[in-house]
Image (spheres, rainbow, N blue to C red):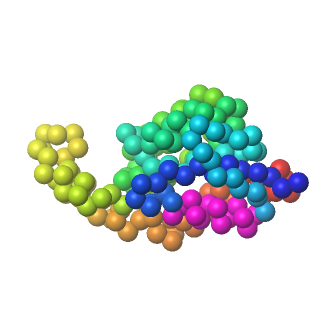
Amino acid sequence: MRPTATLWVSSITGNTAKIAEGVRAVLDELGWDVHDAQLGQCPADDFVIVCFWCRKSSLDPKSMRFVESCSGRKVLALGTFAGFPQGKYADLVRNNVTTLIEQGNECLGVYLCQGKVRKERIEERVALPESHPHHLDKWGILRLTEGQKHPNDTDVLYAQAFVRDYLPSPENH
């Protein structure tokens, strides 16, 4: 019997959808049956994979509601956000997402990659007073400018490697 996974995808700009397509491809390649998730329903599959975009250092609101509807599941989370995946902010996001998932489930891991931010949003933040906590300084502009190149093919490849590392192969399930 093939292992099963529920795939939840929340994407506004297409960043997270691109990562989710790569996740689906690797699951298909590995022989998993993949079911698309619906808000308010968490099927009884072997694993749940949550593809989210970061909002306020955690899951986006729809992904948060989806995770809260799950209970006793093994959850793997993959997200896009406006930070560098190696920094302190990324650690904060991973910790917040892990904590939220583990309120009723088991978090197997959290993968993060940069994603594009709408150019209008960047301009809004640059125009904020320097004293505002969301004002973009030169470093912030550099970070978000770099983010316009992501997620790229390498980010998708890393997401696929993450899934391979954290989910058991079908024969070891």
At a point 19% along the width and 57% down the height, the residue shown is 123
Q: Nearer the viewer, residue 50 or 86?
A: 50
At a point 25% along the width and 54% down the height, the residue shown is 121
Q: Is residue 138 visible?
A: yes
Q: Quadrant of residue 92?
A: top left
Tell me residue 80's x, y (percent): 45, 54
Whether residue 16 sits left or right of residue 157 in the image: it is left
Tell me if residue 86 comes above or below residue 70 in the rendering. below
Tell me residue 70's x, y (percent): 64, 34
Within the magenta stretch, is there residue 21? yes
Q: Quadrant of residue 115?
A: bottom left
At a point 14% along the width and 46% down the height, the residue shown is 128
Q: Which residues are magenta?
A: 18-30
Tell me residue 142's x, y (percent): 26, 61
Q: Main secondary structure of the magenta part?
A: helix
Tell me if residue 30 comes above or below residue 10 in the rendering. below
Q: Quadrant of residue 139?
A: bottom left
Whether residue 19 sits left or right of residue 167 in the image: it is left
